[in-house]
Amino acid sequence: MRTSTSGAALLIVFVLMLVLAALGAALLSQLVGGAKSAASVVDWQKALWVAEGGVNRGIKAIRDDGGAAAQTTSPAANGYCSLAYVEGGYGGSGIGYSGASGSNYDRAAFHGTSWSSSTVYYATLNSVVNANVTIWNFQQAVNLIGSRLRNIEIVCRAIKDKSGGTDPVIQLQYSLNGGGSWSNAGAATGVSATSWLAGSYLYATVPLPANPWQYVMNNNFRIRALRTNAGDRKCYIDWLALRLTTEVDAPTEPWSTGSYASFPLALGTGSIRSILISDESGKIHLNYASQTLLQRLMEYDGIASGTAATLAAAIVSYRGAHWFTTIQELKLVTGMTQAYYDLIDQDVTVYPWVNTLVTMPAGSRSPVNINTAGRNSLRAVIRTGITDIADVDSLADAIITQRATTPFTHMFSTYHTQAATRDNGCLAGFLENQAYLDATQRNQIRDAADGSSYNTTLTGNWTAVAGTGTEFCYYSNAFMVLSQGISGSATRAVAAVYGERYDYTAYSVLTGGTLRPIAFIGQASPRGCWTLPTPIP
Amino acid sequence: MHGGRRHASAFTLVEIMLAAGLLAFATAGIIACFVAALKVYSSTKARQALAGEASLALTVMGDDVRFASGVGVPAGGYALEFTTSRYDGADRPYRYMLYSAANPPPNPPFTAESYSLIMVPVPTPSVPPDYSAARVIARNVGPPTPATPIFSLMSTPTPPPPPTPSRAPGPPLVGVQMTFAGDGESYTIRTDMGPRN
């Protein structure tokens, strides 16, 4: 009987082949996976650095926003623009100075009457070397503290008493130590005009320190017009003042509109899919907002009033022991659920600047940029000032409409109560235009919102008072930049916080601080996260 | 006795040849797969090494540029010059440049296949460059070509004309494109860096 063993070899070979095929398939799979992995490593890294490039482009757009003329306000030397105008006080007693006492102390520091008037007040520098007029006390410039100070100029209008003779030579100077020593600002200039014309203005820029506000706000900062030659002609000065150029951040600027680039933006073999820049100063600061403000914000964000009150109290309690360094820490607050967190996370922050000048409602505050704040943040701030819900909404909407074309630049102006001369960037003037608000409401909003800590009477005369609320400002010093990079099949995101580095405790314009105009406070890192600024003590 | 012969059949020649052929084919396939897998492994390893090197180099450069002032790129885009106080506290000019012992500076022309990216103090007439003491940022960097410079300064917006006062635009961004090559692999990476202070 024949045993059926024939063909076994083929069978064995087939089995072996099956095994080997399986092995081969596994290897092939490994091969394909490995190849993909290799490509992925490359694309992963490329996408990351493309995204990093996107962050740097976003930061560049923020840095360049000074190129947008609309957001730069320049005080006019002739006083028509009250924003520009910083009144000095208490004239000095330099050699040859006259008209420096009594009610005439401000003759050279304030162009008190229309210069087309027949009466022109001026100080006189006699025809001797070192005759001078000195002024200081520029603290009313605090009206502008919610904006970024970009330039300080000394403005002087001078003429000689009659034609011919030797022109008086004027050197504009400034002192940082109360007149102990003086530095020249610009070059000495001969005064040849004999009538009060625009051409008789002298300008000189003061070199900016790290914290320019410490110049302006410190009584040891003084300016003077110094006569450097003797001669046979007196010099009249009817104006010696500071001209401040300030800057705001608004949604009309390229960093906000995105007009600086179109996406996707090719970069090497990859592309930047998007760059998103959000203004952190348009949000409510978790470490500085009052409990009431936090509550109002949460209410407007959709949390029931009772819960919002409880959560606001819990946040205030939490930050008493744990300074918020990220908004994610909100989840550690008692009662804060993911659902609540998701409602408010777009409206809160931990990064922006802090105004330590204010004392009400409870110490230092971090103002909200009225030009970029979200609707709910605006409503929350306004709601801390007035109680009429409909008016709150109307005002928030009016602010949003106004800033889309004309950003707010400051709080008060000399003319804010006069409709004909009201300038559009003035918040107080804007409030005057809102007919649905009564005078009491306007005052309440001003008290709640004035970032300067100063108050004013409605007549436009400056009156310094103990600090009020400070919930609004006009510029930003912290931005979140988020960029997505694409390479092949990989997409990576990198985020950075960019803005001004500041010393939280030293940021006092009265005592001097270490504010740097623009610096880096966040680290755009390959890990797609950012390092935090130095914790606030 | 023949009647009880068992038909113990052997493999036929055809069977053996067929089996051997199939086995050889399968084995060859497997070996090919192995070889390819080894190549992929080697390639992946090389790419990962290059990616790591590129990442490190770009991180270091990015930090330097971030805190630098006076950033400049000589014509040709083969070097980057900047001033920083990061290293010894005093503002000093430094230069990123390519260096190869086989094609020492001055360059261009770049004739070597691979260079190191180094950082050196900008030499002065009295202080010649000491390349042996240079800080090596990366190795295996491919040479630039006129079409693909390593460094480029990006344009910056024009500020509005006077008398409108405005902040001058910030310093320009530095475009960086480097090709890293080694172990048969090459890896080109592109990013932008910017001074942030």
Image (tube, coloured by chain):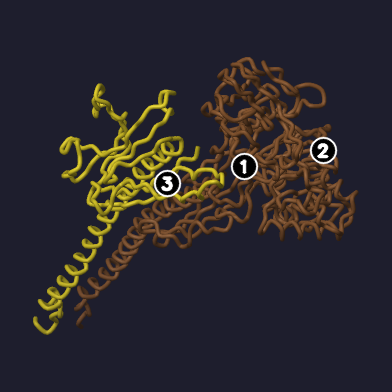
Chain colours: A brown, B yellow
Q: Secondary structure at mark 2?
A: loop
- Estimate the x, y position of residue B61 in percent, counting from the top left: 39, 39
> Label 3 vs label 1: CA separation?
21 Å
Quadrant of the frame with the N terminus of chain A: bottom left
> Label 3 vs label 2: CA separation?
47 Å
- Estimate the x, y position of residue B93 in percent, counting from the top left: 36, 30
Q: Amino acid at mark 3?
A: Leu
Q: Is residue A168 left or right of residue B101?
A: right
2 or 1: mark nearer the eye: 2
From this view, report whether residue A419 is shown above or below residue A149.
Answer: below
- Identify the mark at residue A306; answer none if there is no mark: none
Kindly identify which residue carries mark 3: B173
Kindly identify which residue carries mark 2: A461
Q: Secondary structure at mark 3?
A: loop
Kindly identify which residue carries mark 1: A477
Q: Amino acid at mark 2?
A: Asn
3 or 2: mark nearer the eye: 2
Residue at screen point 21% across, 62% down: B32
Let me know if residue B90 appears in the view. Answer: yes
Are discs 3 and 2 less than 8 Å apart at CB?
Answer: no
Are discs 2 and 1 less than 8 Å apart at CB?
Answer: no
- Which chain hosts label 1? A
> Label 2 vs label 1: CA separation?
30 Å
User: On the image, which quarter does residue A178 sit in?
Assistant: top right
From this view, report whether residue B172 is shown above or below residue A240.
Answer: below
Residue at screen point 57% across, 36% down: A517
- Estimate the x, y position of residue A467 in percent, counting from the top left: 81, 34
- Which chain hosts label 3? B
- Estimate the x, y position of residue A335 in percent, counting from the top left: 78, 48
Q: Residues within 10 Å of mark 2 (few under 14, many from 20)?
A: few
Let me know if residue A345 appears in the view. Answer: no
Are discs 3 and 1 less than 8 Å apart at CB?
Answer: no
